[in-house]
Amino acid sequence: MIGEINPILRRRKLATELRRLREDRGLNGVQVSQALHWSTSKLSRLETGQVAPSAKDVARLLKHYAAADDEAGLLLELAANHVAKGWWESYSDVLTEVSLEYIGLEDGARAVKAWNNNVLPGLLQTRAYANELARLYRAVELATPRTIERRTRARMRRQQLLTGDRLTYTAVVEEAALRRRFGEADTAMMREQLRHLLKLSDLPNITIHVMLLEQAHPIDLSSFVHLQFPAMPLLGPISGDVVYTEDYPALELIEAEDRVYRYSVLFDLLREAALDEEASRDRIASLAGL
């Protein structure tokens, strides 16, 4: 049994495995398309994850590739494990396509590593802090109060990932982000936010490190998030690692193995340079007036 996999990861995993099977057989897309009487564009969409393949189409491909029974069974189960939409799709009216794809990936991750040098990580924000950040974009996007509220609601919904033990979350946060106030955020709001960080840091699956302003930094680097995914029997990781960068207005999902690896090395450098867990909690508590 493969368990429940959200629609974005299901589509991506099927695409990866179908492409691998074709390449292992030494076939090109034109040969397969002609044999199955499909258009080459249909096969391309399936192999690039642009669409979720039906169980019928997957079965035809598996038969054509003479896939092993155990492997074929898992892929057919994956194709049949269909959920039409993730919860995040209901926010498509206020979030970009890249944001929606990222949220779906985040929803299925086993580990999240975040470096934040300007604002606090989205998964660790209070509603008041998140709402104030969303309000700031009104000047450049003309966002309505309804849009702001829905974006904040989506961010709060994402935070359900932090409960339980399915996800391991590690953040390295620049001290400036702990001190910086946005818009109309006052001292009381920031104190509430910092106390929220302390409460979250008590959870066994959450680790927060603080990078002090006065210390020597190992590198000048904008915020990013590194996602890692669980593995399936016989089929390996559901997805390769993905890095998400957000430098308004540019949002990017990075999947090239060499680029993702560089970010993983950089994150380790940042974490090693930052305070350890206990010292980080002490600094946050001090800034919160505790």
Image: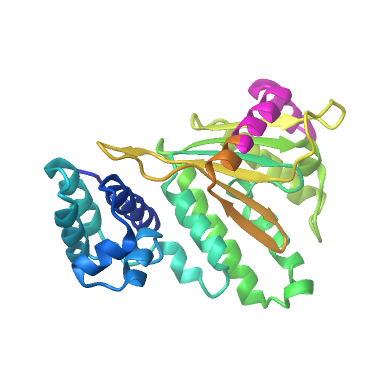
Q: Is residue 31 toward the left or the right of residue 107 in the image?
A: left
Q: Is residue 233 magenta?
A: no
| Residue at 36% across, 71% down | 41
Tally of marks? 0
Percent across and percent down for residue 80 are 20, 58
Identity of the residue furthest to the left in this view = 69
Image quarter where the C terminus lies is top right
Model colouring: rainbow
Q: Position of residue 37 (x, y in %)?
A: 21, 72
Assess whether residue 283 is covered by the magenta stretch. Answer: yes
* Front position in the image: 262 or 270: 262
Percent coordinates x, y for residue 64 in the rendering: 17, 56
Q: Is residue 249 above or below residue 226?
A: below
For the N terminus, give its image quadrant: top left
- Reply above or below: 277 against 8: above
Foreground pick, 106 / 203:
106
Q: Which residues are magenta?
A: 262-290
Residue drawn 67% across and 33% down? 266
Q: Based on the displayed image, in which of its 4 quarters is residue 267 positioned?
A: top right
- Dominant SS type (magenta): helix
92, 290: nearer the viewer: 92
Q: Let me know if residue 10 appears in the view.
A: yes
Residue drawn at x 57%, y 35% as measured from the top left: 261
